[in-house]
Amino acid sequence: MTLRIAVVGNCHGDIIAKAARVALRAVESLDCRHIVSYATATDADRGFIDMADRVLLQVTDFTAPNSLAAGLDLRSGQVGTFPLVACNFLYPYAGKAHPLASASRRPYCPSGYYEGQLSDTMLIDVMHRHEDAPTENAVAEYLALDYARLLDLDRLYDMNRIKMQRIGAASGLDLWPRIERRFRDMPIFWTYLHPNGQLLRELTHHALQQLELGISGTDLAFGIASIKEPLGFVHMPIHPSIVRHFGIDWATPDYRYRLMPEGRFTAQEFASRYIRFEHNDGLTQAVDRVHTNVDLDAGVETLEQERIKSPRNGDIMIHLAIGYWKQGKLASSMAAVLAALVVDPTQAEWVEFLCIVARQSGLLT
């Protein structure tokens, strides 16, 4: 008999569903699906929720009339909840995509480049005002803006806090104290809707416990441990005036934000790239080819060329290492992983992959 689990929510729900599959890997017949809450619900989505043995539902601050939550009895043992986690106060003008984002959508980049979570309406406004001027002028004006003069940042902070506490109370997990305690000392959000791995592990632990399926402590820990930094592939820079206002120690002018697989850039460099709509479509496609095994050799060839152009880009090297590994070129794969770790030795997932390649090469037992 198939055990059906529906996880309804945004990208947080996708992470929870993947961790649930790991934690319940011993279940002989398991169908655990992430059902996107912000997309138009299909009959298949509603049908699966109706048939599901367990439903994990993301709690937000609003309920749309056609919500997938309609008809669910939140008091029943069948339905568990987890909170939407967001930090709008760090990104008050996010949400509106770059004007060219829609036209840049591809199967390997479905949202287009510089979509809503990697955008800032103030930067768009400055960009339009300086259409005929050097990019540097627009970047300087953008970085010189004082968001504290444009809106009440402390009130926005309080609104974010109240909203998160309200959602936390409704879902049984209030993550606001962690956010409040940590955001000045470390990056706990990559974009306004993408929390770091630490918050996601706490969120997932809460959700999986509510399944009430007798998951052992070991299996639960294994599922939680499978969550690294799944949403850390792209970072939206925090505006310098936000950094100053809240006293965010880690976000210095030299701090480099990750735009995988293109590299890491300061807030100033990001703004310049954004205005120029600068992106490497061929590199993005090559990474997709490596991971989907569609035209793998062409993907590897492109990554080899990109590595020559950007010898300090660890993301290119690690994807090239994965491509070599899939081609059976273990020595080349190991060399590429080691080169990536020289650039960035903090990436635990790269170390894990190195161990996999080393075992297959007979260097580890």
Image (cartoon, rainbow, N blue to C red):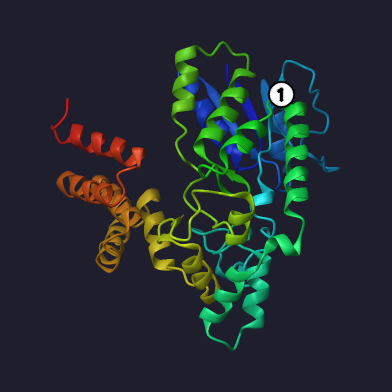
The image position of residue 167, as x and y in percent, is 75, 33
Please say whether residue 82 is visible from this viewpoint.
yes
Between 310 and 326, the residue placed more toward the observer is 310
Q: Residue at x 62, y 60 (%)?
A: 241
Q: Quadrant of the C terminus?
A: top left
Q: Which residue matches tag 1?
A: 172
- The amino acid sitting under disc 1 is Gly
Looking at the picture, tell me which residue is in the foreground, 179 or 53.
179
Place of residue 40 in the rendered image (x, y in percent of width and height, measured from the top left):
73, 48
Q: Is residue 169 left or right of residue 267?
A: right
In the figure, is residue 41 to the left or right of 361? right
**At 53% from the left edge and 80% from the top edge, which residue is drawn?**
135
* Residue sitting at x 52%, y 40%: 196
Asked if residue 328 can be seen in this view, the reply is no
Residue toward you, 51 or 336 = 336
In terms of secondary structure, where does tag 1 sit?
Answer: loop
List x then y, in percent, for residue 81.
70, 27
Q: Residue 12's quadrant in the figure?
A: top right
Q: Is residue 271 above or below residue 218?
A: below
Q: x, y (%) of residue 289?
A: 38, 56
Q: Quadrant of residue 314?
A: bottom left
- Residue 145 lies, with reference to residue 54, above or below; the image says below
The residue furthest right is: 65
